[in-house]
Image: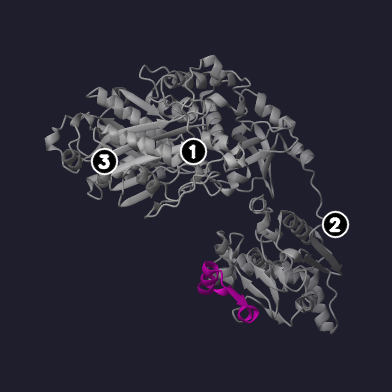
Amino acid sequence: MPDDVPVNELDPSTPVIVGVGQASERLDDPDYRALGEADLAARAVEAALADSGLDADVLAPRIDTVAAVRSFEVSSPLSSSPLGRPDNMPRAVAARTGMDPARAITEVVGGQSPQKLVTEFAQRIAGGDCDAVVVFGAEVISTVRRAQSADAADRPDFTEQVPGSHEDRGFGLAGLTSVQEARHGLLEPITQYALLENARRHRLGASRSEYTRSMAELLAPMSEVAAHNPHAASPQRRSVDEVATVSPANRVLADPYTRLLVARDQVNQAAATVLMSVRAARDLGIDEPRWVFLHGHADLRERPLMRRPDLSTSPASIAAVSSALDMASVDLSDVDVLDIYSCFPIAVFNVCDAFGLAADDPRGLTVTGGLPYFGGAGNNYSMHAIAEIVGRVRRTPGSTGLVAANGGLMSKYSVGVYSATPAPWQRGDDADRQRELDSVPTVHERRLADGPAVVESYTLTEPDKQGRRRGIVVGRLDGGDRFVANTAEGDDELIDLLATADDPIGTRVFARSFARGNRVAISAERMSELFPLRAPALRDRYEHIEVRRDGRILEVTINRPESRNALNPKANEELDEIFDAYFADPELWVAILTGAGDKAFSSGNDLAHMAGDALLAVPKNGFGGLTSRRDRPKPVIAAVNGVALGGGLEIALACHIIVADEKASFGLPEVKVGLAAAAGGLVRLPRAVGPALARDMILTGRRIDTAEAYRIGLVSRIADHTRALDVAREVAQEILAASPTSVRASLRAMADAERIDDPDDAIEETSSVLDALLISQDTIEGISAFVGKRPPRWTGR
């Protein structure tokens, strides 16, 4: 720690913590009142204001900024408030506690939020942007869940309209998950962390039993702290054996986790911190022994899960702790009290591994009781740790405390070093440290995984009502690319291996990609047993699609007129299967795709299924079986008989020729429903119509009619109303009159040329198209027929 700085020599803008407070209630408390989030938070704020030593009516009016940690009820687009909530939480709490701040803020998601906000507003105070700040957070998950099980008439209504400005910073979820991870069940923290935990076990070479014991030895001592904490959600001492042993009260949630090894979300807890400048503290007469200074701080981010070089550790978390300690000029061994975020064991192990901390460190690894026992108070847990640390360093002048706060998947990490010893404010070097972290090469992710692979990490989910478990595997293909996959339903062989082998990591497996994600099996032979390969062929009947063969022509009709021919997952699967069959059938030379009725070609994705799996269940070959199909060697004509919107236009753009009804229209309205034209529209439309018009259409959802589509070259022919299919048939006949080998060679050459920017290079690269044609039977036949003045008899060879 640097030499003491006399208080009277501090810059008046130096930030100090002058008050901390906590509040809680348990369902079995004799005075339990079922407080809502705003009321419980107000209790914590009142306690923090009182902790300054001043009357609330003296301090509260001086608060110019109130910042709220985001609660779980508003932490994702999928979250909800079953009992309602104030629409402006920071001002709702301010009004209850006599504050009228100029600025009210709700922070982004993440357990790093309490420490990040304290650091941010300490910096803002030092910079003169504000002078007195209250930061708070609260969760009433236990109360809400109990109320939901009660009769509707007995449920409280916490809805509240609160006037005043409100800076809502949004969710801040970027990089925490992806569509690919979600479709494979990696949406919940418990499965995500389980992958990291098992990767660490493998790195250490520990057996299942050894590692389970080490997790229990790490966390069980925290319960001793919780047992003496009046705000703990579960104030009960747990033995190492109890935590390590599976039982009805300690069931397996996701391998390797049982209930007592993970954060407990059944809480009613709130905590708050009051920061202000030295100037303001002096003006108000707050006693100097109550002042606590932030000696060191850091806020760093980790790579997204699938891009991390090593799944068993988080360099950003380690760097954040190291950076904060360096700023404070102390080693971790010099810190007197500490709280390491303990949502899952690996979050604690990660710091312990890096700094040589033992599970039985005499200082303890928590001052609250840890998230599994004190309670995982949503994003606000570390506010409780700050409150405890502040109290302890006050009571022991010259001592130092550290708070390590974790958000996401060890994704956002904030650290603070606290002491009552006066110290000047220091700006951090987070940007430089972040650049160092980001400069490390990442792992390439393969979305569609096919071929031999090795298990890099895994977890098994909690059994469902039928006792079935699902495996989630992160693997590496033989080329080194990383992928995520699930075990196949009914594949007991691989499930048993993941559940019982002492270390399944490193096991050779075989991956195959499907519309609903990647699957892994123990071998290619087992994969073929589970998913027998079927030769591409047309069926007699489909649920949502009609097909008609007319000689060399295949007509494909999307038959969902009641939904304007929008595609649900089943229709997508059927189109994918049909186009597989078309491209594989040597007797079919041209395909026509249209929609049933005269209102719509296709209005895209059936949004009625978005609450289910439509967003995640898209065929490997893309929307409609076409938009991501790399090889389309035979012509496909889009007969646009009405609207072609969203995915419908993306399908049309993936066709080789578009014929349109004179009353058709085209558009990409995804932005109007919060989506994006990611099935090719963002790429193909600018190439088809030019970047200026494409940006207009994509960013506004603007539609264009057939006349404009023809003028700009999107459409090649206009049909009279209701005659789009007839005109498409005429175009098909014209194609059939040409050499099929020449048609296919031309398609291939044009596709190759699209990948080459320089026209001269493209011409040279595609000139080899003639090499194959010179030895083609159709070329000889074409020339012979021309010379003989007769119609050619094409064979397609």
- Extent of the magenta region: 689-710
Q: Is residue 747 magenta?
A: no
The residue under label 2 is 539
Q: Amino acid at mark 2?
A: Arg
Q: Is residue 707 magenta?
A: yes
Pinpoint residue 396: horizontal percent, then vertical percent: 25, 22
Label 3 close to label 1 by CB (< 8 Å): no
**Toward the viewer: 59 or 715?**
59
Q: Amino acid at mark 1?
A: Leu
The residues tagged by marks 1 and 2 sit, at their Cα atoms, a distance apart of: 46 Å
Q: Main secondary structure of the magenta part?
A: helix
The residue under label 1 is 409
- Residue 78 got which mark? none
Pinpoint residue 336: horizontal percent, then vertical percent: 30, 22
Q: Of marks 1 and 2, which one's residue comes earlier in the chain?
A: 1
Pinpoint residue 786: horizontal percent, then vertical percent: 80, 82
